[in-house]
Amino acid sequence: MTTHVSIIGLGLIGGSLALALKRGQGVTITGFDRSYKSADEAYRRGIIDAVAPSARAAAKDADFVILAVPVSAAAALLQEAASWELKDTVIVTDTGSTKLPIMEAADGLLANGTTFIGGHPMAGSHKSGISAAIGHLFENAYYILTPPPGCAEEDLKRLQDLLAVTMGKLAVLDAGEHDKMTAVVSHFPHIIASSLVNLLADQEDSRPFIRRLAAGGFRDLTRIASADPVMWRDITLQNRTELAAQLDRWADEMAQVGRMLAHSDPQEVEAYFTEAKRYRDELPAVSENAAQGALYMQFDLHIDVPDHPGVISEITHILASHEISLTNIRIVETRTDVYGILVISFRSARERNQAYDALGSETDYSMQIL
Ligand code: NAP
C-alpha cells in the first residue's frame, strides 16, 4: 500500500524529513515550496517524487500533510487549509519551533473534523534551505508531538508510525508546556546570546582589541546568535508571552547578582558559581545514542596542533579518508604560544567520536572533547 506524504516547505527541515521518510516502505512524497528553485532542486536530487503547483494541490490526495515552513507562514497556511479539499483520513502536522499559536491556527481545520497534530523535531543546523537537507538530521533528537485535546489515540499512533523511520525520539507534550520549556532551554538563551554579542559590539569602538579576545570561548558561547534572524524573529514573536516571563525572572536573577557584587563576600560569590556548576554538571550529556536537547548544538573536537603549514590538510585528509564530514574548522586565535588549538565541528556525536578514533590512531596530537 502506498502512503502519500505532502511536504509544504522544502528547506532544511522539510527536505530532511523527505529524505528520512523515503526510507519508509511505500512512501511517496509530493512537495511544494513557494520558491520554485527549492522545489526543483528537491525533485532533481530525488528528495521528493513530485512537485505540486500549490500548497492546496499538494495536500489534496495526501494521507499526511507536513508543513515545514517558518512558524508565521505555518499559522497562515493552517488557517487557509480549513477551506482546502482534503482526504477524510488525512493527518496534518507541522514542524514549527513554537506550538500554542500553531495549535490555535489549526482551530478551523479541527472544527471541520480534520486531524491536526502539532510537531517539533528538535534538530537543526547552522545552515538552512534544501541544500543543507540530510536524511539523518533527526536521529536521536527529540521529536515532540502536541496532539490537541480529544485527538484520537489511533491518529496519534498513525503519525508516530510514519515518523518512526526518522529515528527521532518521539515524545508527546501539551503545546503550552512545550512553549514554556522551549522558552527556557532554547528561545531565551537565544536572546541572551544575541544580547552578549551586541554588548561586545557596543564596546568595540572604545576597545578594538576586545574583538580578538572574543575569538575563542566567547565565540563558542554565543554560537547560536548566528542562526537565521528571520526564523528567530518569528519564534520570538510567537512565544513572546513566555519570553517576557523569562525576562522578568532573568531581571530578578541579575538583581541578585547585583546585590552579591555589592556585598563583595567571597563565600557568597563562590556559592553562586558552585550551585550553578553542580546543577550544570548533572545535566544529561549528549552521547552517541542519547537524545539532543532543545538547543541546536555542534559537536566539537579540540586538537592541540603544532603551528606548521600543512597541519590542517593533514587532518582533513585523515577525516576524508575515513569518510567523516565536518561542518566547521577553525584555529582558536587566543592561543599565542607555538601550539594552537584547532577546533573541528561535526554534525553528530557519532561523527565526532569517529574522528577522535581516526585521528587518535594516525597522529600523536592530543585531543579533547569538552
Ligand atoms: P528553511 O530552511 O528556511 O525552509 C523553509 C522553506 O519554506 C523555504 O524553502 C521557504 O522558501 C519555504 N516557505 C516559506 N514560506 C512558505 C509558504 N508560505 N509556502 C511554501 N513554502 C514556504 O527553514 P527550516 O529550518 O527548514 O524551518 C522550517 C520550520 O521548521 C520552521 O517552522 C522552524 O521553526 C522549524 N524548525 C527549524 C529548526 C532549525 O534549526 N532550522 C529546527 C526545528 C524546527 P523561501 O526560501 O523562499 O523563504
Image (tube, helix red, strand yellow):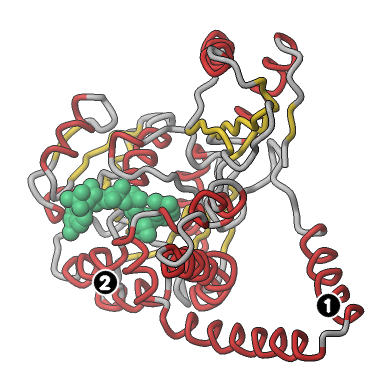
Give the side of residue 137 with respect to residue 220, left or right: left
Give the side of residue 189 with respect to residue 90, left or right: right
The x, y position of residue 220, in whole percent, is 57, 49
Query: Which quadrant of the rendered structure holds the C terminus?
Result: top right
The x, y position of residue 8, in whole percent, is 24, 50
The kind of secondary structure element at disc 2 is helix
The x, y position of residue 275, in whole percent, is 84, 72
The kind of secondary structure element at disc 1 is helix
Pick whichever, 50 or 285, lies toward us.
Answer: 285
Image vertical order of residue 368 relative to residue 90, above or below? above
Residue 44 appears in the figure: yes
Picture quadrant of residue 93? bottom left
Residue at 49% x, 39% y is 166
Q: Is mark 2 within 8 Å of ligand 1?
A: no
Residue 147 appears in the figure: no
Query: What number is the disc on residue 109?
Result: 2
